[in-house]
Image: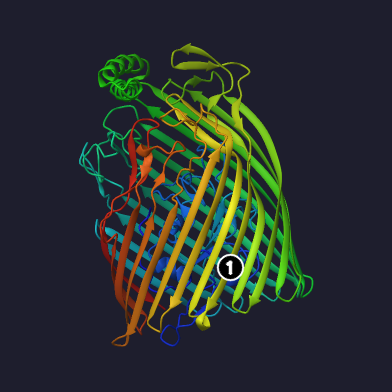
Amino acid sequence: MSSTRYAKSLLALAIAGTPMALSADEEASAVLEEIIVTAQKRSESLGDVPIALSAFTGNFIKDTKLTDIKDLIAYTPGLAGWSSDSFLDAVSVRGVSTNAFGIGGDSSIGVYKDGVYYGRNGAAMTSFFDIERVEVLKGPQGLLFGRNAASGAIHTITEKPGLEAVEGYARLGVGERDRLQAEFAYNQPLGDTWAMRIAGIHSEEDGFVENLYNGDDLGAIDNDAIRFSIRKEADWGDVTLTAEHEDRKQYGTVYIGRDANGNSITGDDRKANIDFPGKDDARVTGVTLTANIALNDKMSLTSITGYHEHDWTYSEDWDGTPLDPAGFVNDQDGDYLSQELRLNVETSEDLSWYVGASAYKEDVTARQSNATGDTTPYFTAYFTEYFTNYFGDPYSGAYYGAYYGAYYGALTSDILETNTTKGEYSGWAVYADMTYQLTKKMDISLGARYTYDEKETTTDIQGGGFVWAVVTPTPVKSKQDWDDLSPRINLRYFTDNNTMLFGSVTSGYKAGGFGTDNVTSSAPVSPVLSVALPDAALDDFDPETILSYEIGAKGDLAGGRLQYGISAYYYNYEDLQTVIIEVGKALVENIGEVDGLGVELDLRAAINDNWDVFFGAAWSDTDVSGIPLDVCSEPSGSDCDGNRLAYNPEWMISGGINAHYPFSSGEVFGSLDFSWQDEFFSDLENTDANTIDSVGFVNVRTGWNSEQNWSVSVYVENVFDEESFAARSSAFGAINIAPTLPRTAGVDISYTF
C-alpha cells in the first residue's frame, strides 16, 4: 500500500466518521473543533452525518504530501488496493473493487471533483493541489451525485475564490532521487462581488527500480497542473467557473518476474529485467460551472455543469522478463459532458427534502496493441510449470513444456495484434430524499434513485492468438440499455448532545456493459485464432447490484478531547462483474454473489495543548459463492466458494502521534505515524502464490513554524525501508506488480500570506 505520511496536526483528518479535528488554535485549547461537510448536499457537522464518511482538509493533504486519491488509502479504514498507475481497477471499498477492465464497463468506485464524475481510467487520477477538502463515502451512493457509485465515492472539493482578502501560499520541496515539488495558490478579490483564484503544482522524481536490461531507473514522474477559477457572489447566491489542466507523465506499472516461491527473479524487489518501456502519460482538461441560487429563504437551486476530456497513453511489459511476449500499448482519449440540477427545500423545522435530475454523455476510444517477439521461451516456461504440477514430475513437465512451448511459440511469435474500441455512452437519472424529524432526538430519511444507462460499443479486433484470439473482418457493434431503482432508508438518533446513533439500508447498482476482447460467434481458422461470423456481437454483461446494511455511532467524550466513530456493516453483492483472463482470451461475466461484513473504528484524542494522537482500524470479511468451476477453481480443483475477494485485507490499522511546542518566535513540531495492512489475495482463487504479505510503514517529520508565516520541515517516509507490492499475478506468468517506494528523505519550505 502507499506509505503513510506525516501530518503537521490532525486538523481535519477524519477517518471512519470521526466528527471533528484538532483546533487550528492549538496553543490555546486542546478541544477539537467541528468539520463542516456537504456529503448530504447540505452543510452539517461531520459528527451529524449518518453515514460512514472520512473527510480530509486541504491543510492535511498538503502537510502529509498526499499526491492523489490513492494516497488516501493509507488513512481510510475500509479503503484498499493502492497502485502507482492511472487505473482504478484494484481500488476497493469494503472489499468491492472493479473486477473488470476496459472501456466497455464502469468503475465500482465513483470519483468526483467539484460534483462532476471522473470515473474513467486515465482521467480519474489527477493531482491534489489547492484542495479545500476530500470526502470519502463508503457503501453504495445513489442520492448524492449526478452519477451513482456501487461501492463508494471519493469527492474532491477544490478551493474557491474568496472575496475577503488577497491571500495565498507557496511551497517548495526537495528530496532524494532528485525529488522536486512546487505548489502555489493566489487569491485576488475583484471588487465587492467578484474574485479569482489561480493555483498550480509541479512534481518530479527519478525512478527507484533499476532495470537490469538497460540500466535505466523505472518509476519516474514529471507532473504539471494548473487551475483557474472565478466566482461571483450576490444576494441571490453565487456562481463559480473553474478550468483545470494537468499534464501527467510517469512510468507505467513495473512488473518483475518471480519464481515458484514468489521471490523476484532479479534477486531484489526493487530490480527489474524488462525489455519493453513503460509509460503512463495523461493530459486531462476540465471545466466546471456551478451555480447556487437562493430562490427564497427555504428553497435553493443548484446547477452543476461539467465537461472534461482526456488523452492517455499507457504501455507496460506485463510479463516482467526480458523475453518478448509483452509489448502492450493502450492509447485512449475521451470526453465527458454532464448536467445536474438539484432543488433543496426546508419545508419546516421537521421536514426537509431535495430532488435532483442529471444527465451525461460520454465518448471514449481505446486503441490497444501488443507486439510479440519470440514467444517460445515464454510458453516453454508456462507449460513446464503447468505439467510439472499436473504430473508431479519435473521430467514430464520439462518434456511437455518443451513440446508445447515450441508448438505455440511457432503460432504466436513475431506478431502485432490490435484492438480498437469506441464507446458512445449516455444516461440520465432522477433522485429524491426526504428527512423528517420524528422526535426532538430522532429523524428518518427516505430516498430513491431511478437510473437509465445506454451504451453503444464498436470493436475492431485484429488478433493473433496471443492476447486476442479473434479477427473481426468488419467492426462489431452492439447496443444495449439498463435501468434500476435504488432506494435508501436512514435512521438517526441523538442520545444526547455528544452521541449520535444511526442505521441504514441502501441499495446500489452499477450498469452493465460489453466485454471488448472477444465476440459471441466465431469460427476457428487455426489452433489459436478464430474469425468473427456475420452474426457476431460483443459479449455483454449484466448490472451488478448491492444491498447494504449499516449501523454506527459517533460522539465525543471528556469535554471534546476524545472523539470516536464506529460503524458495522453487512452487504450482499449479486451478479459480480469479473474478468476471466487466459492466454488468447479475456471475457467479462456476471458470476455468483458476495457476502461482506466488517467493522470500522476511529479514535482521536487531544492529550493536552501540545500533544494529540489518532488511531484507526478496519476489520473486513468477504465470502464469495456460486462462481462456476470453469471460471474460478483452486489448484486442488475445488471451486472458489467461501473464498475472499481480491484486494481485501482482513485487518487495516493506522495511527500516529503529533507534538508542537512554542520556540523562538514560532513553534517546533514533530510527528510519527504508521499504517499496517494484513495479507491479502490478488485473485479470487486465493492462491498462496498471489498473496501479498502483511506490511507496515512508518513515517516521521519535524520542523519549525515561524510567526512570520514561514515553515520549514524535514521528513523521512518509510523509515524502515519496508518492501512490498501492489499485487501478484499468475494470469500470464508469475509476476510481482508495482513495488512500493523505498525510504525517502526530504525538506519542505513554505510561505503563507
Q: Name the image quarter holding the C terminus.
A: bottom left
Query: Please, what is the three-letter code of the amino acid marked with disc 1?
Result: Ala
Specify the quadrant of the image occupied by residue 682: top left
Q: Is residue 314 left or right of residue 388?
A: right
**Which one is in front, 111 or 605?**
605
Q: Which residue has dot 1 on it?
A: 553
Specify the quadrant of the image occupied by residue 382: top left
Residue 296 percent coordinates (x, y): 77, 73
The colour scheme used here is: rainbow
Question: Residue at coordinates 63% horizontally, 39% vertically from top-left?
Answer: 543
Residue 736 percent coordinates (x, y): 33, 40
Residue most toward the right? Answer: 347
Secondary structure beneath dot 1 equals strand
Q: Is residue 40 left or right of residue 21?
A: right
Residue most toward the top? Answer: 525
**Which one is in front, 387 or 405?**
387
Question: Residue at coordinates 45% horizontally, 83% vertically from top-left?
Answer: 30
Residue 526 percent coordinates (x, y): 45, 12
